Image (cartoon, rainbow, N blue to C red):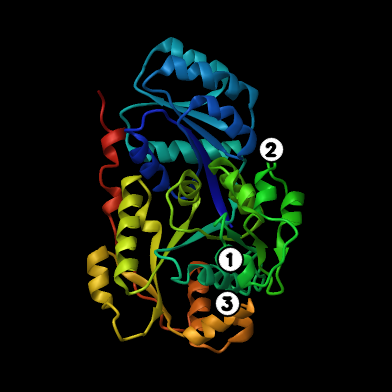
Amino acid sequence: MSQGIRVIIVNTDEEVAPDLRAVLLSIEGVKIVAEIDEPALLAQALSQLPAEVLLVHLDPNPAGMMDVVAPLIEAYKGQFAAIAMTEDRDAELVMRAMRAGMKEFLWKPFPPEQLGETLQRVGQEATGNGRRLGRLISVVGTTGGVGATQLATNLAVEMAQLESWRGAPNPGSRPNVAVVDMDFRFGQVAMQLDAQPAYTLGELCETPEQIDMQMIERAMFKHATGVHVLARPGDLTQAERINAGQAAGVLSALQEHYDFVVVDLPARFDPSARAVFDMADTYLLVLQLLVPSVRNADRILHELSSIGYALERVRLICNRYGRESGYLDQPDVEATLKRQVEFLLPDEWKTSSAAVNMGAPLLTIGPRTKLRQAYRTLAMNLAGNNDTEVGVEVEAGSNDASKKGLFSFLGNSK
């Protein structure tokens, strides 16, 4: 686990949202658990979502925004630290904010590093030495049937077997690992592990208060491999009721109790998916060397860039690598996407199909297969264990595209 600072953003200015998000996600340890663009929803978010920092963009109506946030800061005093950012230098506004309990005031324009320093200082003051949070890894397939769910489940299983990983409290101790099915309607995580849980993600999302360890223990299915499974809701009606705030609240709670949280997330850009994007430490984008998959990968990368997502957190995974007939060339795909494919998972179609049909991870039905070894290597790499055994890792190329324009919002004044 690592020190983390969870941030709730309140911002009604759509024009600055991408730049603000990009700056925050470029700061190590910062996780955005909610972005509130309607101040009236802030009270509900504060009651359900744990966070160390409330970041309030007061503009374009500082007085009106203070009318909403001031009583909430006072009511939740001690639960988080509040930071305001504005161009308004009115002394009365500042005094009102400080009396309400605002910890810091940042006047625009200011450099991004100032925001990072302020967040680190204020966030650690709010939690002592900083709360320890597990790492969140989201797995997204570029097309249906690309193998993202099988990757997510096997990655979680392999992580649960590790005896050497970054952040381990003791040598030889295995991490606590959860795998979460965020395909609310048609997810297959539980099926691929032959799990029959009594409770699901739906029950946790229906909890009106903040989620505690007792609720988590009841909802998680304990698989024989050591991984804990949080299945999709049992029916479509329950799935339809889940909103972004509930999804973020569940994931944030899981990060307090697990060293690694692996999320199987279908390719979509609704508010729930964006909540996962913002919270994820690593975003695994799974593709095949096929035109539809590569086209969708390009669209996803473009969309992530446009909303200010930290693209350095995205890692491309090529599944079913090794087929020759009709497949695109890897260098051509990398040139199209302007990114390197970092991991190649070998094509073992019969083995992977048998695993899906049996509802079993490759650890149990094919422990010596190349595909299982590739899953293990990927788990070791993501966990910070460099003792890789199989040559499936490709050196990652640098990508500075997400850093462009970060100063346009924070460094300009009207």
Residue 130 shows in this picture:
no
As shown in the figure, which amino acid type bears the numbered disc 2? Pro
Q: Earlier in the sequence, mark 1 or mark 2?
A: 1
Q: Which residue occupies 56% across, 42% down?
A: 243
Asked which secondary structure carries label 1, the reply is loop
Q: Classify 89 as above or below 224.
A: above
Residue 356 is labelled as: 3
Query: CB under 8 Å between callouts 1 and 3?
Result: no
Residue 229 shows in this picture:
yes
Closest to the observer: 110 or 340? 340
In this figure, which residue is indicated by the disc labeled 2? Answer: 208
| Residue 260 in which image quadrant | bottom right
Closest to the observer: 112 or 197? 197
Closest to the observer: 301 or 112? 301
Residue 399 is labelled as: none
| Separation of marks 1 and 2 at Cα, in angstroms | 26 Å
| Separation of marks 1 and 3 at Cα, in angstroms | 10 Å
| Residue 113 in which image quadrant | top left
* Residue 87 location (% of width, % of height): 34, 22
As shown in the figure, which amino acid type bears the numbered disc 1? Gln
In this figure, which residue is indicated by the disc labeled 1? Answer: 188
